[in-house]
């Protein structure tokens, strides 16, 4: 039986990032909400998070290099876009709306 998504009032979307390419880093254009970033596999590089459609501009935050696997909750709004580009190959899931 398939899940009935209509029961969710305003569901989150997700994007899994497993490389450091610029195209993989653009999560969303326009305004939205960053709910959380899940670190599935730790990597040696930092993970900067920008309110932009590129890796510059307003920095929302940065996950430090070699951060432990965990869920990091932000629950913050962004205006221009959401851009998350890891500095090293790892496995990250970005939860946003």
Image (tube, rainbow, N blue to C red):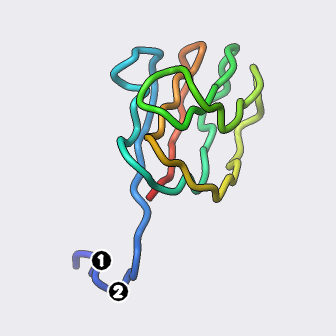
Work out which residue is located at the far left of the displayed protein and give it.
1
Q: Is residue 9 above or below residue 56?
A: below
Quarter of the image for the N terminus: give it: bottom left
Q: Residue at x 54, y 35 (%)?
A: 92
**At which x and y percent is residue 48?**
63, 26
Residue 1 horizontal side relative to residue 85, left or right: left
- Reading the image, the residue beneath label 2 is 7
Secondary-structure class at tag 1: helix
**At which x and y percent is residue 79?**
49, 48
Residue 66 horizontal side relative to residue 60, left or right: right
Work out which residue is located at the far bottom of the displayed protein and give it.
7
Quarter of the image for the C terminus: give it: bottom left
Q: Is residue 21 above or below residue 83?
A: above
| The one of 56 and 47 positioned closer to us in this rendering | 56
Examine the image and state in which quarter residue 64 appears. Answer: top right
Question: How many circles with numbers are drawn on the protein?
Answer: 2
**At which x and y percent is residue 55?**
51, 20
- Reading the image, the residue beneath label 1 is 5
The disc label shown at residue 78, or none: none
Report how far apart the C-alphas of labels 1 and 2 lie in the structure.
5 Å
Secondary-structure class at tag 2: helix
| The one of 93 and 80 positioned closer to us in this rendering | 80
Q: Callout 2: 10 Å neighbours few (<14), some, many (20+)? A: few
Q: Callout 1: 10 Å neighbours few (<14), some, many (20+)? A: few
Examine the image and state in which quarter residue 62 appears. Answer: top right
Q: Is residue 44 above or below residue 33?
A: above
Mark 1 touching mark 2, by CB under 8 A? Answer: yes
Q: Residue at x 69, y 20 (%)?
A: 46
**At which x and y percent is residue 52?**
48, 33
């Amino acid at each position: 039986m398939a899940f009935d998504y209509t029961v969710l009032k305003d569901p989150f979307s997700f994007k899994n990032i497993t490389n450091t390419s610029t195209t993989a880093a653009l999560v969303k254009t326009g305004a939205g909400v960053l709910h959380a970033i899940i670190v599935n596999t730790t990597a040696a590089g930092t993970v900067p998070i920008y309110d932009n459609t590129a890796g510059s501009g307003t920095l929302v935050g940065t996950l430090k290099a070699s951060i432990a696997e965990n869920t990091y909750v932000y629950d913050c709004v962004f205006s221009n876009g959401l851009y998350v580009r890891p500095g090293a190959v790892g496995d990250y899931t970005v939860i946003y709306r």
